[in-house]
Image (spheres, coloured by chain):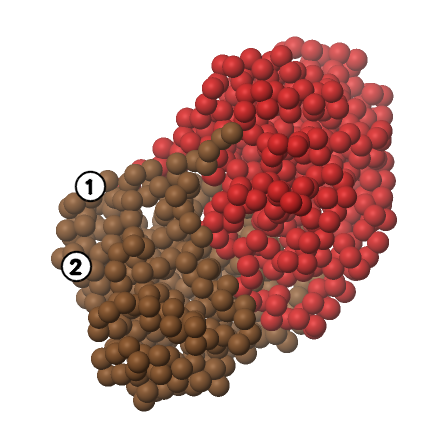
Chain colours: A brown, B red
């Protein structure tokens, strides 16, 4: 019988997924997830808004809708993004997707022929890497430091890979490292995209969750030539269960993305799009975001302080200014053994090699999530991690 | 800058989409859509159920969920499908998708290499054809009659195309023709799939909407060797805005589909999955289906009677036993001119060539939808169509 297609035959379930299975055990403290904090959901408002929608315009919420997305939500997003400098109304368009993940996957579908390169930060978000793998893209990793991709390394990657579909970056509070790409580096990445005539896919799910420091302009906002495709999402600022994200790009790119989505999901759940629209227009959205930033600032601070207090000095941690993740790096030794020892003591973290272009390469790092666990779990989990670490380092 | 990928470069927006634009004019009577009747939505129950969910388990409805789908809904579907003979619990699995469309698209993604053939009924559903086109599949059409695909023609297609990813069929109340594949033909198609060792993708969105005659067993229910992948949906029996469908196949196929969906939409909107589950378990679902069948029986009957009363005898129509569509065939002449003349008189129908493997081939047919228009619109629209037809035939 038919074999699987070449494009997807080699793609395996995400390593995180396997780790998350261990977290089905209620005694395991999980720092391995990436879920928003339960207390971050505006449950009362969503219930009220949902009831309004199903009372006032139920058929609109239940019937087929258009692939581009709920027109009112699209207009609000266009206005918002234009204000922030991320949307050139005369040249660009915006489509609603089933989460930013679908925007990323669609970029691979419409731009990347099998065997072509996609250049990523090394390490990068496994969901995106697997989306690229599922089109048989060749993943090319670029070394990063605490300011993001290193431009010299990116230029070498571009020179070495003349058939590059696009550069993929998460400039704000990157998943998995928590690192924010500096303004200088953003400019350098854009200049290199211009010089080598390639696209950039800028994935920004966490941008609104800055709890320290000041915003750095998106690469999108500096792009005057239509090289940047931008993906945003309501998953981290409202609810991931809604599956509402969006993609901004030149009009012809959005037209092609529309054709692609018309043949895959037809449109995102329309009730969810209406909920998102009413939420951003009928409630104090900015106050809601401030509340989320406070939640994550406290959780991140608590985790960092606990780590600094108890972990061996030889293990370093990034200090994110926003988002959901921080990143630990061991001085040497077997990172997977450390992660296995941690899970044996009932604390789950994600081994860094899950985020490499080639999972079999060596990583000395591991990802910690602070948004999902409770404060008590953060303190207790870090204590256990530190005990494991002290026996090894 | 980057060109679009080979796989999608040539895929155009669906012709129906362009026609539907004309139906934005409120004076146009549209027989071109495929929407459920507005009166088919159980608005009160959905509002009550939604409120229950957002009161009793709001975090579960708003948080990330698993790619396979809401466990309770999957179990209900497995039980239901097992009862109907469409699920072999020991060998198969089931995944929730964002509508059956995503199940179909995923079959192309995981099984069809670029340039390989997908064998379809000629005519077939444009959404599926475009999904296949978006992976650069080679569409091979098989002639059909009032009993479905003609086995001799299917066998020739299989012989001529040794690199065939799968056979795609809509056996019940086919879109666009309204035709139901006979039991004999279903057996013959399955035997040919066995003989030539290819898969069948059985798309069954309308199966529950039989309003005349007796059910014919699904091809899936006769398959003992795991050749049939089955796609179902809540779009026509509950609400298409929910975007909840499902796919049944051998366990290893569902595992690969899970990897594919993990990298595209992550999971279907979880609120919608919970609504669907509570609807089928907390209300009298069978009574609801009976109500829908009555609605569509009446609408189909009204349209057919009106057509028989006023259209020239030389134009023939299928007489569907269920579903949402019927199919008119002109004796000769320019079908597109007929469709253009109709829309000029403010009645929209879909020209048959939209459903061909190659839109530039000639079709003498057109698709009529009776589920979306009101009874008044059906009567008035058919009257106008007949006037147009009488000037041409």
The residue tagged with tag 2: helix, strand or loop? helix
| Residue A222, position as x, y percentages in the image | 27, 60
Instruction: Write down the chain letter for disc 2.
Output: A
Q: Is A58 in front, or is A122?
A: A122
Would you name the residue on which mark 2 appears? A151
**What is the total number of numbered labels drawn onto the structure image?**
2
Residue count near mark 2 (Cα–Cα under 10 Å), binned few <14, some 14–19, many ≥20: many
Q: Is A150 in front, or is B93?
A: B93
- Quadrant into which the C terminus of chain A falls: bottom left
Q: At 82% across and 40% down in the image, what residue appears? A: B293
Say whether residue B226 is left or right of residue A177: right
Q: At 48% across and 18% down in the image, what residue appears? A: B161
Residue B127 against residue B57 in the figure, above or below? above
In which quarter of the view is residue B328 placed?
Answer: top right
Residue count near mark 1 (Cα–Cα under 10 Å), binned few <14, some 14–19, many ≥20: few
Q: At 40% across and 46% down in the image, what residue appears? A: A11
In contact (CB < 8 Å): disc 2 and disc 1? no
| Residue A367, position as x, y percentages in the image | 35, 69
Instruction: Write down the chain letter for disc 1.
Output: A
Q: Is residue B288 visible?
A: yes
Residue A383 against residue A111 in the figure, above or below? below
Q: CA distance from mark 2 to mark 1?
A: 17 Å
The residue tagged with tag 1: helix, strand or loop? loop
Say whether residue A344 is left or right of residue A216: right
> Disc 2 or 1, which lies upstream in sequence?
2
Which label is found at residue A280? none
Q: Is residue A235 visible?
A: no
| Residue B343, position as x, y percentages in the image | 64, 29
Which label is found at residue A162? 1
Asked whether the residues under marks 2 and 1 belong to the same chain, the reply is: yes
């Amino acid at each position: 019988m038919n074999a699987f297609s070449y494009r997807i035959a080699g793609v395996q379930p995400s390593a995180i997924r396997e780790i998350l299975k261990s977290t089905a055990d209620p005694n395991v403290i999980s720092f391995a997830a990436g879920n928003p904090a339960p207390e971050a959901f505006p449950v009362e408002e969503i219930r009220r808004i949902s009831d309004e929608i199903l009372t006032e315009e139920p058929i609109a919420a239940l019937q087929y809708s258009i692939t581009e997305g709920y027109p009112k939500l699209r207009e609000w997003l266009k206005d918002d993004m234009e204000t922030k400098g991320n949307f050139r109304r005369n040249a660009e368009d915006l489509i609603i997707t089933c989460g930013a993940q679908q925007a990323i996957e669609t970029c691979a579908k419409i731009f990347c022929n099998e065997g072509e390169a996609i250049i990523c930060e090394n390490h990068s978000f496994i969901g995106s890497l697997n989306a690229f793998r599922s089109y048989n893209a060749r993943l090319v990793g670029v070394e990063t430091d605490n300011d993001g991709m290193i431009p010299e390394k990116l230029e070498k990657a571009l020179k070495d890979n003349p058939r590059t579909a696009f550069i993929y970056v998460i400039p704000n509070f990157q998943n998995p490292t928590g690192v924010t790409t500096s303004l200088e580096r953003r400019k350098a990445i854009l200049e290199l995209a211009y010089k080598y005539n390639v696209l950039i896919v800028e994935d920004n799910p966490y941008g609104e969750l800055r709890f320290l420091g000041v915003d750095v302009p998106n690469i999108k906002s500096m792009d005057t030539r239509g090289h940047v495709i931008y993906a945003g999402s309501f998953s981290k600022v409202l609810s991931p269960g809604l599956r509402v994200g969006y993609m901004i790009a030149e009009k012809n790119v959005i037209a092609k993305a529309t054709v692609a989505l018309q043949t895959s999901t037809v449109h995102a759940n329309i009730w969810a799009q209406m909920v998102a629209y009413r939420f951003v227009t009928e409630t104090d959205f900015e106050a809601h975001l401030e509340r989320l930033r406070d939640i994550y600032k406290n959780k991140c601070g608590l985790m960092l302080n606990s780590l600094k207090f108890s972990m061996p000095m030889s293990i370093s941690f990034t200090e994110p200014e926003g988002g959901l993740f921080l990143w630990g790096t061991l001085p040497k030794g077997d990172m997977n053994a450390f992660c296995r020892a941690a899970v044996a003591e009932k604390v789950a973290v994600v081994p860094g090699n899950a985020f490499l272009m080639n999972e079999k390469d060596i990583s000395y790092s591991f990802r910690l999530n602070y948004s999902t666990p409770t404060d008590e779990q953060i303190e207790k989990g870090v204590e256990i991690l530190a005990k494991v670490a002290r026996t090894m380092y």
